[in-house]
Image (cartoon, coloured by chain):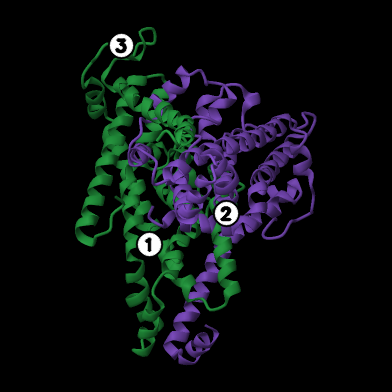
Amino acid sequence: MAAQRTNYKIKDSAGDKLFLFIIYIILVLVLVAVLYPLIYIVSSSLSSPAAVTSGKVWLWPVDFSLEGFKVLFQNKQVVSGYGNSIFYTGAGTLISVVLTIMIAYPLSRKTFFGRNALMMLITFTLLFSGGLIPTYMVVKEVGLIDSRWALLIPNAIWVWQVIIARSFFQSSIPDELFEASEMDGCSDLRFLRSIVVPLSMPIIAVLVLMYAVGQWNAYFDALIYLKTADKFPLQLILRSIIIQNNSAAGLNDAMKQVERQQLAELLKYSLIVVATLPVLVIYPFVQRYFVQGMMVGSVKG
Amino acid sequence: MRKHWQLYMIVVPPLLFFLIFKYYPMLNTVLAFKDYNVIKGIWGSPWVGMKNFNLFFDNPMFWPLVKNTLLISGYLLLAGFPIPILLALMLNEVRSGRFKKVVQMVSFAPYFISTVVMVSIIMLFLSPRLGFVNIAMNAIGLDSVNFLGEPGMFRSIYVWSDIWQTAGYSAVIYLAAIAGIDPTLYEAAKVDGASRFQKILHVDLPGILPTIMIVLILNVGSVMAIGFEKIYLLQNPLNLVNSEIIATYVYSVGLLNANYSFATAVGLFNSVINLILLTSVNGLAKRFSNTSIW
């Protein structure tokens, strides 16, 4: 492989070199375009309120301060939203992953009667859905409006995840293994628990990550199903403070008008950082699982 | 079958999930043909035939809604579809493994940003007074623009922020496809003295064409299903003429004004058009390129 590469290098003509040079320049520009806004936000969140509102921040923090984060964690709304989001992410991910395996594994077994019909039943929901109002009516009918369960159950299973998990089980759990354990009198559940699950850790990691990120980032179900503010996940609190511009409670009333405005502006940056941090911190470690998951998914099942 | 009763048992909870939260709502779409009455419930409410659909088709909002929906998703398709392909092809040319990894990792990252945070970032950056973009524009002598208050800017803001967020993610699918191309083809191209550009044109592109077709089918098939979540958050009274789409309209008429039957009809119209689009695009692709999603 290495020899092939060097071979390539020698053969590059002037035109190829120019072509490659242009590609590098474009990719560097892509890199900057993606990174710059992210750095800007983090830097702003670490600057003083006055520096943020006067536009002094360009790249690195100006007048370094942790003021924004301090105020943020004294804010009841934000703290309760954070707690709620952690709960929804933990509980929701657990429910989703378990349910997904419960349907994906039987679907992967060739001897499972009704396998194709069941698969069709599931994939059809990708093509057609009842829509917003009819779904809302069902959630209402089963009594989940303004219940925490409304964020955990109605969207618990994603069809794509079932497809990904199923094709993984199909391709990496050999039939012979099953036949052998069947002869030894191993039940299906036991086989699933002590052989399939341990052998499928890469795909379970993908399921966990996808569901967890989805749950952490979701706001729409909370918007339509929840009414009580102390059940709101962080994303809804974020929407209220940043997008609807309701200034965060906890800003000292005695502060001067200007100071309050400056702090309110700074808080928006800190809030973005705090809400995105958990996901972005684990991201570099888990990226390869995501990529793997997408590859498995792109294999036709 | 009796031997494997356990498998049939564990399927029951997920199956119930699909029946209750996916299929039962489909039954509920009969609401579209009824005049919903809270006391009588869905099944007791009187049938009104196509009344709700006619109300929608005769509504002055009908054409603007269809137009906005199609223009936004059409724009997104035209700009957003080729960019990940180009990104993947370029990344594949990069020789330094580390640089390739860094670009891939960084461009993938925004995919994990939530919709609410994404819209928050857009609003902070484009804010007329304190936003970074306007401050930068003022610095080079340009006047401030209230970007989100300009209806004409709405589509571009939506589409380009979407590309910023998802291009790196979408490129991964194509990179995987390129990795699967038969290496002997590259050797043959090299022997024939192909330049890098020719190699992309005659080996890479044909190699990933099936993948491109499948993604295209899925994209075209979902033009009517354009994401509600982000548009809803970006909306304000000033840009509403261009930003009200069918999905956001269903939300405001249905849930905010409690006009259930009418909103269900509008939503059903949207789903049916979407289904027709997807099946016909899939059929066309099958006919002309032998690739299809089913």
Name the amino acid type tagged 2.
Answer: Pro
The residue nearer to you, when weighing A271 against B34, is B34
Name the amino acid type tagged 1.
Answer: Pro
Name the amino acid type tagged 3.
Answer: Ser
The residue nearer to you, when weighing A2 against B31, is A2
As drawn, the label of residue A202 is 2
Above or below, A299 against B97 in this view is above
> Residue visible at 38% across and 76% down?
B200
The residue nearer to you, when weighing B132 against A159, is A159
Tell me the purple chain: A
Q: How many marks?
A: 3
As drawn, the label of residue B45 is 3
> Residue visible at 59% across and 57% down?
A287
Residue B271 image point, x, y percent: 31, 35
> Residue visible at 56% across and 67% down?
B103
Quadrant, the N terminus of chain B: top left
Residue A74 image point, x, y percent: 78, 34
- Check disc 1 and report the residue beneath it: B82
Above or below, B10 against A196 in this view is above
In the rendered image of the structure, the colour used to display chain B is green
* Real-space Cα separation, disc 3 to disc 1, in angstroms: 49 Å
